[in-house]
Amino acid sequence: NGDKTPPSLSFLRAACQIRTSKDIELVILHLLSHYEKGKTKSQKGEIEDALFDLEGIALWMMLTKPKPAERRKRCFDIINLRSSRPKGRKKVDKYYNPLSLSSKER
C-alpha cells in the first residue's frame, strides 16, 4: 500500500451526492467503521484496498447508470462480503466479486 495514493474520500463523498451513485454511502460508512476498529496495518490495508475498488464502482455507477435495484444489490453484496469473511484475507469468489467490475461492466 505504500506506493498508492490514499483513496479519495472527498471523491467518494461527492459521488454520494449524485443520484446514480448515492447508494455507495452505505458501503463507505461500513468500511470506515471497520477501518476505525482495525488493529493491524494489514486490516487497515484491506479496507484501503476496498475503498480504492469502491472508487471504480462509483465511477461505474455514474457512467453506466445501472438500475436502482442493481446498485443496491452491488452495495449490499460488498457489505455482506466484508461482514461474512473471517479475519485476515480470504479468497473471493472468482466469478463474482462485488468490488471488481466484470469485463462487460467496463
Image: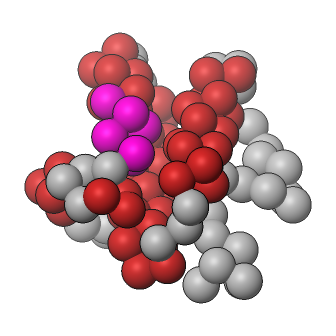
Which of the image's four quarters has the C terminus?
bottom right
Which of the image's four quarters has the N terminus?
bottom left
Residue at left offset 40%, top offset 45%: 23
| Residue closer to the observer: 27 or 20 | 20
In the image, the segment drawn in magenta is 23-29
Residue 79: which quarter of the image? top right
Residue at left offset 36%, top offset 58%: 21
Decide if residue 91 is in sight here.
Answer: yes
Residue 103: x %, y % from top left: 72, 83
Residue 64: x %, y % from top left: 49, 79
Residue at left offset 65%, top offset 29%: 80
Residue at left offset 33%, top offset 21%: 33
Residue 84: x %, y % from top left: 70, 22
Q: Is residue 96 left or right of residue 59?
A: right
Residue 29: which quarter of the image? top left
Residue 57: x %, y % from top left: 47, 63
| Residue closer to the observer: 3 or 56 | 56
| Residue closer to the observer: 84 or 38 | 84
Q: Is residue 19 above or below residue 45?
A: below
**Magenta span contains residue 12:** no
Q: Is residue 28 above or below residue 21?
A: above
Q: Is residue 106 above or below residue 45?
A: below
Q: Is residue 98 left or right of residue 20?
A: right
